[in-house]
Image: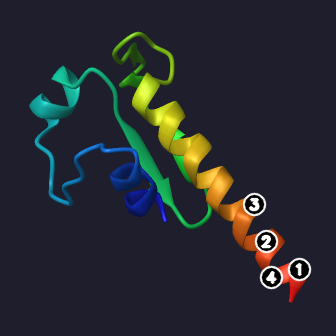
């Protein structure tokens, strides 16, 4: 769901192992799981990552995922 949402927003998606150096230099990053859905990485080893706040892409993806979940819930309750 997160990958589909990101792609729908035109955000490039790659599933790969990321070296720590790449992560440290990324302007923003997030993690996803079935339990947490989507979580911005705002610090690494106690140090702020990026701006220390969720980034624009992370927030956009989160909003799109929520929209899709709400749409699915609405669709299933209509049937």
Q: Which mark is residue 73?
A: 2
Q: Where 51 sits versus 61, above or below?
A: above
Q: Which mark is residue 77?
A: 1
Q: Is 53 left, or right, of 57 in this rendering?
A: right
Q: Where 44 sits versus 53, above or below?
A: below
Q: Tell me which numbered mark, 1 or 3, is placed earlier along the sequence.
A: 3
CA distance for labels 2 and 3 = 5 Å
Query: Which residue shows up at 89% across the image and 80% down it?
Result: 77
Q: Are marks 2 and 1 in contact (CB under 8 Å)?
A: yes
CA distance for labels 4 and 3 = 10 Å
The part of the image, by quadrant, that contains residue 21 is top left
CA distance for labels 1 and 3 = 11 Å
Q: Are marks 1 and 4 in contact (CB under 8 Å)?
A: yes
Label 4 sits on residue: 76
Q: Which mark is residue 70?
A: 3
Q: Are marks 2 and 3 in contact (CB under 8 Å)?
A: yes
Q: Which mark is residue 44?
A: none
């Amino acid at each position: 769901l997160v990958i589909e949402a990101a792609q729908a927003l035109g955000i490039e998606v790659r599933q790969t192992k990321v070296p720590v150096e790449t992560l440290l230099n990324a302007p923003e990053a997030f993690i996803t799981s079935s339990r947490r859905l989507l979580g911005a990485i705002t610090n690494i080893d106690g140090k702020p990552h990026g701006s220390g706040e969720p980034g624009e892409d992370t927030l956009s993806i989160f909003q799109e995922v929520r929209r899709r979940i709400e749409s699915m819930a609405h669709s299933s309750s209509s049937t």
